[in-house]
Amino acid sequence: MHRLRDLRCWLVLFLVFSCGFSAAHQTKLSSSLLTLEDGVVSAEIELNVLDLGAALEQDFLNSESKLDVKTIENLSEEIFAYIATNNQLFCAADAADLMPTGQFRFDEEHLILDVRWVCDGDTSPSRYNVTLFQEIDTTSRHVVSVEGDHEFVKLLSAEDQSVFFGDESNSLWDLVKKFVISGIEHIAIGFDHIAFLIAVIVLGRSFWPLFKVVTAFTIAHSITLTLAVLNVFAIPPEIVEPLIALSIVYVAVENFFVRDIARRYWVTFIFGLIHGFGFASVLRDFGLPQEGLIWALASFNVGVEIGQLLIVLVAVIFWRLITLLPFFSDTELGVRRRGNISLVVSASVGILGLGWFVERVFM
């Protein structure tokens, strides 16, 4: 019992310490809407001002956490230089000069800049290369939507930084594949969603009951995610994020009073509706275009489901391996010890969720 008590103390201390350093959504997201007409490429580039501040080591928020437009305008040359360096349009083999065609515009915490490139002579646009924010976060993503002479959508990353005009790889399958991967990645880095999932499944011991519980969560968040992205109905992040933290606390506490999670799917469905609005903020930052929007939404949801089921699979395998150890065998004492581990994990996740709630409401 001393070993179990020590394990509980270390785990709780680690999670309490990590509360102040863990964040729900860390991915740097930006987008470009390109229009190709002969040798002229016009673009609407949209990026998050908080990401831009991190890249330029500047604080673009005032004391009331509102956008400091004056500071942004005073640093317009530095901002434009950063965008020009990390958004390059190539005419044949040469990079064209980026020219602004308007002033900065703002949409909540997003900065929007209208620009264009002109290819000289007989050359035509060959490649668009984007490296925005990759120097501060290698998981940065950039959505490129192309209209005019070519029409397609592509999601760029540190591993795939370029759009090639006229290239066959810019296909619907390319869009689907990349948004599935993005859904999996979002689960992998969405620490609050992982915490909720762990609290939900920690009492489970077999795959299929957990599959139903997790799938109910996916169906629910798919509904609200779609409603929010399509601007049918949405809840502000300052309300959604604390509610997500409270959902983690609720399920963690409930684990101390229930032993059968076979009917927990209704709980995960209800909380999945809340988490869907959290997922929607990620896809809004992607700058999803109207063209291919439904495919992108469906693909992202499939990716999230795959990511969740991988976590479930790992949990089931873990418990199967635990039962092979004499200390946690299928004897009455071994079962009680496994139950104590579940409660330790639940308590730790509950503390983590409570820390997030305090951080999101009062900090």
Image: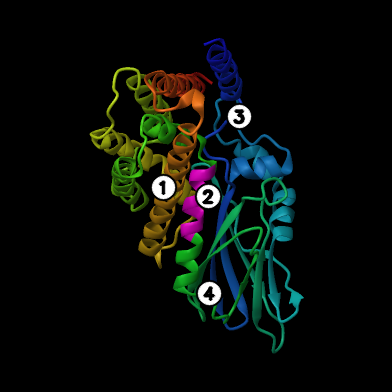
Circle 3 crowding by C-alpha within 10 Å: few under 14, some 14–19, many from 20: few
**In the image, which disc is placed on residue 65?**
none
Image location (x, y in percent) of residue 265: 26, 37
Q: Reply yes or no: does residue 289 show up in magenta.
A: no
Depth check, front residue: 240 or 87:
240
Q: CA distance from mark 1 to mark 2?
A: 13 Å
* Numbered disc in front, either 1 or 4: 1
| Rendered residue at 57%/66% (across/down) | 43
Q: Is residue 16 above or below residue 31?
A: above
Q: Which mark is residue 170?
A: 4
Q: Earlier in the sequence, mark 2 or mark 3?
A: 3
Q: In the image, residue 112 lies at what x, y percent?
A: 56, 53
Mark 4 residue element: loop
- Category of crowding for the residue at label 2, using alpha-carbon neighbours closer than 10 angstroms: few (below 14), some (14–19), many (at least 20): some
Q: For mark 1, what is the residue?
A: 309
Closer to viewer: mark 4 or mark 3: 4
**Residues in magenta?**
179-188
Q: Amino acid at mark 4?
A: Asn
Marked residue nearer the N-terminal end (4 or 2) = 4
Label 3 residue SS: loop
As measured in the structure, the alpha-carbon distance from the residue carrying label 4 to the one carrying label 2 is 21 Å
| Residue name at image x 68 percent, y 58 percent | 131
Location of mark 3 (residue): 62
Sequence-wise, the earlier of marks 3 and 1 is 3
Mark 3 vs 1: CB contact within 8 A: no
Closest to the observer, 315 or 99: 315
Numbered mark located on residue 185 in the image: 2
